[in-house]
Image: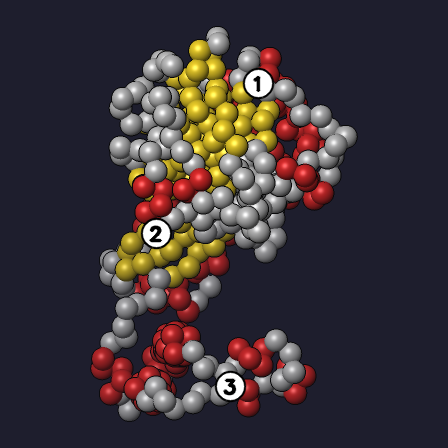
Amino acid sequence: MSNWPFRFVHASDFHLELPPLGLAEVPDHLRDLFIESAYWAAERVFETVLAEEAELLLLSGDVLRPHETGPRGPLFLAEQFGRLAERGISVYWAGGQVDPPEAWPAAVALPDNVHVFPRGRVEELVHQRDGTPLARISGASLDRQRTARASSFDADPTGLFSIAVVHGAADLAALRARDVHYWALGGRHDRSTLFSSPRVAHYPGSPQGRRPEEHGAHGCTLVQVNQPQPARTSLIPTDVLRWLDERIAVDDATTRDDLEVLLRQRIQALIETVPKVDLLISWTIGGSGPLVATLRRGTLRSELLQWLRSEFGFGPPAAWSVSLEVEPPVSLPPEWYEQETIRGDFLRAIRQAQMNTGEPIDLQAYLAEEHLAGLLAPAATLDDKAMRERVLREAALLGSDLLSGEESES
């Protein structure tokens, strides 16, 4: 047995078969980036293993769906695995939902340094360095018919550093109950650590975010082992394009020129922080004042979005603005509800519907005949209470925006 310090890389959810989603139309200059991003990010994972001189690479599932990537996916991985083999670096792979062991094409041989765990049952291996045991690695590929439970994973009886590689949802209490030093989990696209002391259970997330909800940095995890201390994890970013949510606050004194300055400063700061990553930014403008009202009702919002795209969206690196939305107010001015105006009548009707939660709201009467049998018909019946409240709140905001112009003109 050895207590030598060592390091390894943990990665999952490459999803080589999936390009990024979330844009109604991908700009021409970003099209190649969208098509290639999953592969480029995955390649950075292997480069990280080599650059950090890691002892091994753990893959905890959903790496690729071979029949959707075609030959390119398996050939790409075989080449990358071969790069690690040349340096004597082992790969331990537990398949997930899209990459069970039998999905790998027989025509593409895996190098000897790659070990794929079987489905539905735990297999235990001892990883060695120069003939000396370094870590005990247990793993199982996902099998929905025969789930590998946490109780199936055991720590090494001699105290060797123990690793479990598995894909899927985790039972926190069950993981804590085992003496496994490091749980290499997969199945979440965003990075998360369930616990970090005295043992670790960790999802590294996907190397590349694929939709606006998967915002922020994505990558793989470098794990430093130096017993008896808990393993230390650190994010190594590998994404080549990054989704960001950014909020700009304005007040009563903020002008359009002021807002442009704020947007410019924020973009420049973001580019300086990650100078080699293309950015996809969803903007939210919040706060109060006449500028907010102008953004909600007029063409200024679309004008600013076009300015942002033309000014910063072509790079390099590109900082492409996906959208620019205005944060809705928490509440409308109470006096609006009391005014003897069209807006006041409208808001009082909305308030009455909000108070009378048992009163049905059926919008099907407003649908054209051809839509009654289509997808819109169920959406026009607000049976769900939370949905009903959200629709009424948004209707109040939209109606106030449209009718406020008329009120000011009258």
Q: Label 3 near label 2: C-beta < 8 Å?
A: no
Residue 363 marker: 3
On screen, residue 283 versus residue 58, left or right, reads left
Q: Secondary structure at mark 2?
A: strand
- Considering only order in the chain, which callout, 3 or 2, is on the residue closer to the N terminus? 2
Q: Secondary structure at mark 1?
A: helix
Circle 2 packing at 10 Å, graded few (<14), some (14-19), many (20+), is some
Query: Residue 198, position in %: x, y?
Result: 26, 32
Using the numbered discs, state the Cα–Cα distance from disc 3 to disc 1 in whole angstroms.
61 Å
Residue 65, quarter of the rendered image: top right
- Considering only order in the chain, which callout, 1 or 2, is on the residue closer to the N terminus? 1
Query: Residue 150, position in %: x, y?
Result: 41, 42
The residue furthest right is 107
Using the numbered discs, state the Cα–Cα distance from disc 2 to disc 1 in whole angstroms.
42 Å
Please name whichever residue, 201 or 66, is drawn nearer the observer in this view of the structure: 201
| Residue that label 1 marks | 84
Residue type, numbered disc 3: Leu
Rendered view: 400 above or below 176: below
Q: Residue at x 41, y 42 (%)?
A: 151
Please name whichever residue, 95 or 350, is drawn nearer the observer in this view of the structure: 95
| Residue that label 2 marks | 247
Residue 320 marker: none
Q: Label 1 near label 3: C-beta < 8 Å?
A: no
On screen, residue 171 versus residue 110, left or right, reads left
